[in-house]
Amino acid sequence: MEPSMEYCLGQVLQKDVGKRLQVGQELIDYFSDKQKSADLEHDQTMLDKMVDGLATSWVNSSNYKVRL
């Protein structure tokens, strides 16, 4: 399945730490590929939710691996 912005946001906001760790590389690949992430420039609201989700859910996580 080719990731979409909605899929990535869902992965960022999930509570399961194991799944967060698995999806980390997938998110990096998605954001790094301009063809895959072309919708980032067009949907500022979704991008804001993504950044907010990463900041609140991942950076502030008690699991050091998720924070990294």
Image (spheres, rainbow, N blue to C red):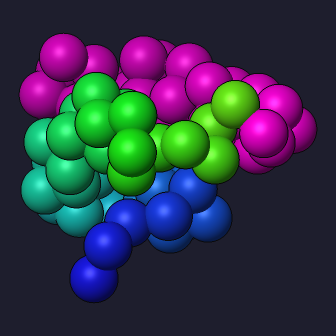
- Quadrant containing the N terminus is bottom left
Q: Is residue 5 above or below residue 62?
A: below
Q: Is residue 17 visible?
A: no
Q: Is residue 61 above or below residue 36?
A: above
Q: Could you say which is closer to the camera, residue 11 or residue 5?
A: 5
Magenta span: 42-68
Which residue lies most toward the front here?
Answer: 35
Q: Could you tell whether 36 is left or right of 60 in the image?
A: left
Residue 42: % across, % down:
78, 39
Q: Residue at x 23, y 63 (%)?
A: 19
Q: Is residue 68 visible?
A: yes
Q: Could you tell whether 40 is left or right of 54 in the image?
A: right
Q: Could you tell whether 10 is left or right of 40 in the image?
A: left
Counting the numbered discs, the total is 0
Q: Could you tell whether 3 is left or right of 38 in the image?
A: left
Please tell me in which quadrant of the rendered image residue 15 appears: bottom left
Which residue lies most toward the bottom here?
Answer: 1
- Quadrant containing the C terminus is top left
Residue 21: % across, % down:
16, 47
Q: Is residue 3 magenta?
A: no
Which secondary structure is most common in the magenta stretch?
helix
Q: Residue at x 20, y 50 (%)?
A: 26
Q: Residue at x 32, y 73 (%)?
A: 2
Residue 7: % across, % down:
50, 68
Q: Is residue 53 magenta?
A: yes
Q: Is residue 5 above or below residue 57?
A: below
Please tell me in which quadrant of the rendered image residue 10 appears: bottom right
